[in-house]
Image (tube, rainbow, N blue to C red):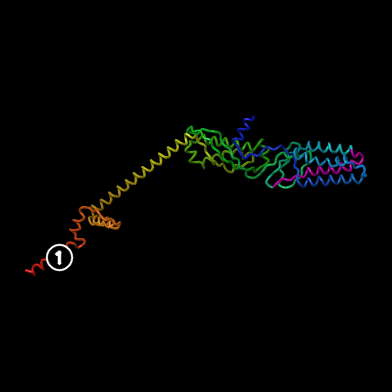
Amino acid sequence: MATLEKKWSELVGNLRERTPERQFTWNTLNLVWFVLFLAAGILLTASRSSPASLSMETVLVLLSPLLVPLVTLVAARWEVALIMVAVTSVAAWSRLSSSAWLYLLPYWIGAASALSFQVVREWDRAIVLRMGRFAGVRGPGPFFVLPFLDAIVRRVDLRIRVTDFAAETTPTLDSVPVTVDALCFWLVWDAEKAVLEVTDYVQAVVLSSQTALRAAVSCNDLTTLLANGEKIKEDVRKEVDRKTTEWGITIQAIEITEIHIPDELQEAMSHIAQAEREKRAHILLSEAEREVALRNEEASQIYRRDPVALTLKRLSVLHEGFQHGNSMVVVPSRLPDELSEDDLFGLKALSELRGGAKSNRSEQGG
């Protein structure tokens, strides 16, 4: 049994401590009400008794009912309260004898009326049983119960709760053992069903979540588990919510916080991812080279059909070389010939003019 509880505490967190059953509670209002009735009984007794007869023992007996709220704060059960009231009443009767009714009657009325007045906080609901049968859901705010007949068996918190849990090590569809940590966000919308339909609704929610999460892990391979986390979480939520709806509980969300993978597998996955990245890099480089080759082939076809375009390209290359400030520029071998043939820069005409001028000067000199 201890091993099971230890294992449960390791797999589940944020669980509330189990508290003993409290059939009623003390609050400021009913405690003040009880003290007022007790004080009225003490004053009535003192008014009918002489000061000499009120010894220290008698005063202690008159104040002994204050032990009732102290004891029932620890053990808030009707049988405990009844035993305490009976013991203190017998002690008071033995000390006061004939005037005991002046003290006991306010004491009994105050104890019964004070314990019948209960208060529930805004976010809580109280489940009340009357002689073992369901009597209703009380709260929020003040309400009354029948002393010794009604019992508050459970206070249910209607706020959203967060419970973190871990599925035990489970093999995936491709036989990889993984442990998944998750959070469950849930709330109780029907306190009556949550208490009457299931023994421990908190434990039932957590166990249902663990079971659904293990089923989801075992039905998917590791790649799917890592890539399609949102879909898996929604599938788990729907499966758990289908079960808990009958208990008056709604599962709002299931969040996977961490997936524990064996270290050896993590190293292998790292190598695979690195190899995949290198593969993609080589493929992209090859595709880029292929694209460049296709563009060059298209350009060569254009230059073959249009020599002027080819010449302009050569001049563009030459211009770019000069712009970079290079001291030496290597130009295609046919470019000087084509430049001289087309006389693009007027060099041929200039040389002819210079030659004509020289011949004129020689003729004049002759």
Residue 178 shown left or right of residue 24 in the figure = left
Residue at the far left: name it.
366
Is 113 left or right of 136, judged from the image as shown? Answer: right
Depth check, front residue: 108 or 322: 322
* Count of numbered circles in the view: 1
Tag 1, which secondary structure?
Answer: helix
Quadrant where the N terminus is found in the figure: top right
**Residue at label 1?**
354
The image position of residue 127, as x and y in percent, is 71, 41
Q: Which residues are magenta?
A: 95-121
Is 322 situated above or below 28?
A: below
In the foreground, 182 or 306: 182
**Residue drawn at point x = 68 percent, y = 40 percent:** 192
Q: Residue at x 48, y 38 (%)?
A: 224
x, y percentage for residue 308?
Answer: 23, 57
Residue 176 is inside the magenta segment = no
Look at the magenta stretch and give its main secondary structure. helix
In magenta stretch: residue 115: yes
Is 191 displayed left or right of 312 in the figure?
A: right
Q: Quadrant of residue 31?
A: top right
x and y percentages locating residue 356 in the rendered image: 12, 66
Name the residue type under label 1: Arg
Residue 133 appears at what percent x and percent y?
Answer: 73, 37
Image quarter where the C terminus lies is: bottom left
Residue 182 versus residue 301: which sits nearer the camera?
182
Classify residue 311 as left or right of residue 54: left
- Identify the residue at image location x=32%, y=47%: 291
Mark 1 surroundings within 10 Å by alpha-carbon count, few (fewer than 14), some (14 through 19), many (20 or more): few
